[in-house]
Image: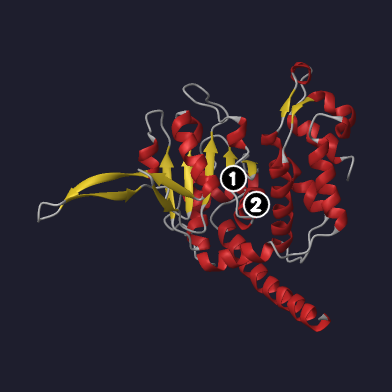
């Protein structure tokens, strides 16, 4: 029995080393096209390796669309893009049945798949679509299949959605409800690049030659990596840190003094997301097990879209990232 366990552990170690090198190569390939967004690239990779979806928040022109295109090529995924608008209907993204007539005069319905049938889908400015269309996409994200005219249609595997939002312009938008925001594993802030990165952008993107994305993985390799991540061990101290952090982000006794600022907090799905994310981050770094530092580093993108502050907290000028930082000091 002990020999079988040892062989299993050796197999996991060998697989982890191989997958880790593939992921690092993919990360370097993405960074050769997307400049000055190392943190965004890492968190996006963590989300995909964890089998989840991400919400990218940033002003226009910060290479969010370029990032999704590059990820599709680098990871060997079929990538598509939907530009959300207020008049977009659910059938525009899911697909619809049409009535076909054969040469013999027979009529039958045929399903035409929509752009949601992709392995990597960019939902550009998702908050511009009506709640009905948002719900159609977010249900597909959760269920991994759609139903049209009573017939089930499974989505391809892997299936990941990277949705974007513009934090500045809110006119004519439909903010995502909290229950739908919870479907996203992470909310990733895309900030401005630093001066050196922007200098590189100027030279690399305005010349005759432009660096193109190159493939480093395949869809099958990605699925293998996602399965491996679920087999990586997690120490008791890391599990307790995840539980303490997520439970303290809810109003109640466990949040202590900070609880008076929290109107509502994350549910168990946040704990599940953080558990997977810390494993994925460890694998990207070439480690076989996550640490408490991984929990602290990923706490904000995993938790902040799953929390709301009280009126008193907002009146005092407090922010959700500030509250999360206070909670992190209790376990850091």
Q: Position of residue 294 (x, y in %)?
A: 78, 52
Q: Residue furthest bottom?
A: 3
Q: As rendered, which of 231 and 109 lies closer to the eye? A: 109
Question: Does residue 92 appear to the left or right of 41 in the view shown?
Answer: left
Q: Which mark is residue 248?
A: none
Residue 177 location in percent, x, y? 58, 29
Quadrant in the picture for the N terminus: bottom right
Residue occupying the far left of the picture = 104
Q: CA distance from mark 2 to mark 1?
A: 16 Å
**Who's the residue at 35% across and 43% down the image?**
149
Q: Which residue is more in the foreground, 81 or 191?
A: 81
Horizontal side of 302 relative to 129 (left or right) equals right
Disc 2 marks which residue?
38
Residue indicated by mark 1: 54
Vertical position of residue 59 compared to residue 101: above or below: above
Left or right of 129? Residue 281 is right
Quadrant position of the C terminus in the picture: top right
The residue at the point 48 percent across, 46 percent down is: 122
Q: Residue 80: x percent and y percent?
A: 42, 50
Q: Give the residue at x 45% y 28%.
A: 130
């Amino acid at each position: 029995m002990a020999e079988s366990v040892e062989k299993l552990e050796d197999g996991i170690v060998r697989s982890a080393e191989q997958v880790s090198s593939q992921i690092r190569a993919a990360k370097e390939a993405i960074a050769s096209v997307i400049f000055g967004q190392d943190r965004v690239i890492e968190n996006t990779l963590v989300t995909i390796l964890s089998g989840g979806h991400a919400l990218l928040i940033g002003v226009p022109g910060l290479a969010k669309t370029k990032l999704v295109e590059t990820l599709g090529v680098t990871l060997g995924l079929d990538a598509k893009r939907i530009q959300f608008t207020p008049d977009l209907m659910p059938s525009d993204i899911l697909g619809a049945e049409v009535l076909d007539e054969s040469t013999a005069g027979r009529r039958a319905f045929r399903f035409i798949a929509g752009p949601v049938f992709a392995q990597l889908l960019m939902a550009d400015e998702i908050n511009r679509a009506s709640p009905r269309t948002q719900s159609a996409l977010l249900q597909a994200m959760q269920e991994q299949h759609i139903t049209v005219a009573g017939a089930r249609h499974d989505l391809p595997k892997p299936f990941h959605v990277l949705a974007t939002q513009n934090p500045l312009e809110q006119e004519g938008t439909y903010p995502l409800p909290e229950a739908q925001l919870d479907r996203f594993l992470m909310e990733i802030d895309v900030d401005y690049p630093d001066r050196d990165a922007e200098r590189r952008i100027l030279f690399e993107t305005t010349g005759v030659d432009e660096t193109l994305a190159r493939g480093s993985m395949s869809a099958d390799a990605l699925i293998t990596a996602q399965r491996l991540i679920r087999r990586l061990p997690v120490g008791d101290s890391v599990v307790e840190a995840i539980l303490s952090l997520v439970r303290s982000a809810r109003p109640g006794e466990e949040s202590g003094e900070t609880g008076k600022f929290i109107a509502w907090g994350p549910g168990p799905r946040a704990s599940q997301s953080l558990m997977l994310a810390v494993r994925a981050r460890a694998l990207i770094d070439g480690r076989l097990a996550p640490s408490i530092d991984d929990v602290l580093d990923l706490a904000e993108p995993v938790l902040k879209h799953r929390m709301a502050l009280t009126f008193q907290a907002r009146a005092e000028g407090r922010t959700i990232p500030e509250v999360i930082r206070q909670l992190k000091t209790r376990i850091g």
